[in-house]
Image: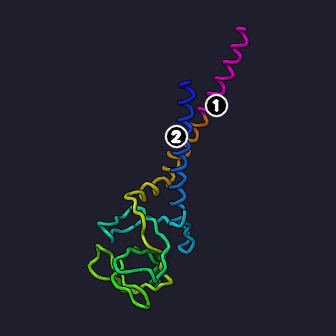
Amino acid sequence: MNKMIFKRLSTVLVILVIGCIGFLLFISYQAKKEINDIPSIFGYKPLTVLTNSMQPKISAGDMIFVKNKKAVDVKVGDIITFKVTEPNTKTKLITHRVKRVSDSGFITKGDNNNVQDNWEVKPTDLLGEVSIIIPNAGHIAKFVSSPIGFLIFIILPLLLFILIEVYERILKILNKKEDQVIS
């Protein structure tokens, strides 16, 4: 009876661990994709913060979840994520606090920056408002998506799980044969 409970609990634990790792891999993978194609999970877009411009509220390596928000609903003090394309660079995502709202867009500033941003965020460039902040989760997602992290957290546990299953099945077959010989 105890073995059966232990087996069920260990199976549930393995499934939870694989699910968490899969979630982190998904988030890491999406970070490498095109900015315009960021997938969402229940309406939330997971992103990893790369700079300390929003410290102490948000630090580099934190994971943020951005919820879609209409431009008309944005107000001063909101932390928003938006697209910026500077000359001769790729489009990038920036997360800053709204300092001023106008009819044509928003003026933003990083909490840790000395001056406001030198651009106005257009309503069409708004990705959404930061809803959830998970400290340091971005570091974990980055490590899990690296070759060593993938080996440690995906390949090895999967191999271990398979080996345990094979061992238990062989043991079960040997016990049946042993019972037949005794009978």
In the rendered image, residue 142, in percent from the top left (x then y), is placed at 46, 57
Specify the quadrant of the image occupied by residue 162.
Answer: top right
In the rendered image, residue 126, in percent from the top left (x then y), is placed at 47, 79
> Is 78 drawn above or below residue 141 in the view shown?
below
Counting residues from the start of the chain, the first of labels 1 and 2 encountered is: 2
| Residues shaded magenta | 163-183
In the rendered image, residue 103, in percent from the top left (x then y), is placed at 43, 91
Q: Residue furthest front?
A: 73
Three-letter amino acid code at the position of disc 1: Val
Q: Tell me, for residue 166, which label it has, or none.
A: 1
Q: Is 26 one of the magenta-colored residues?
A: no
Q: Callout 2: helix, strand or loop? A: helix
Describe residue 86's horizontal placement relative to residue 25 as left or right: left
In the rendered image, residue 146, in percent from the top left (x then y), is placed at 49, 55
Describe residue 18's horizontal placement relative to residue 171 as left or right: left
Circle 2 residue: 13
Quarter containing the N terminus? top right
Q: Residue furthest bottom?
A: 103
Q: Residue furthest top?
A: 182
- Prevalent SS, magenta region: helix
Specify the quadrant of the image occupied by residue 50.
Answer: bottom left
Identity of the residue drawn at 29% across and 66% down = 56
Instruction: Mark 1 and mark 2 in contact? Answer it, CB < 8 Å.
Output: no
Three-letter amino acid code at the position of disc 2: Leu
Identity of the residue drawn at 55% across and 72% down = 34
Specify the quadrant of the image occupied by residue 137.
Answer: bottom left
Q: Residues within 10 Å of mark 2 (few under 14, many from 20)?
A: few
Q: CA distance from mark 1 to mark 2?
A: 19 Å
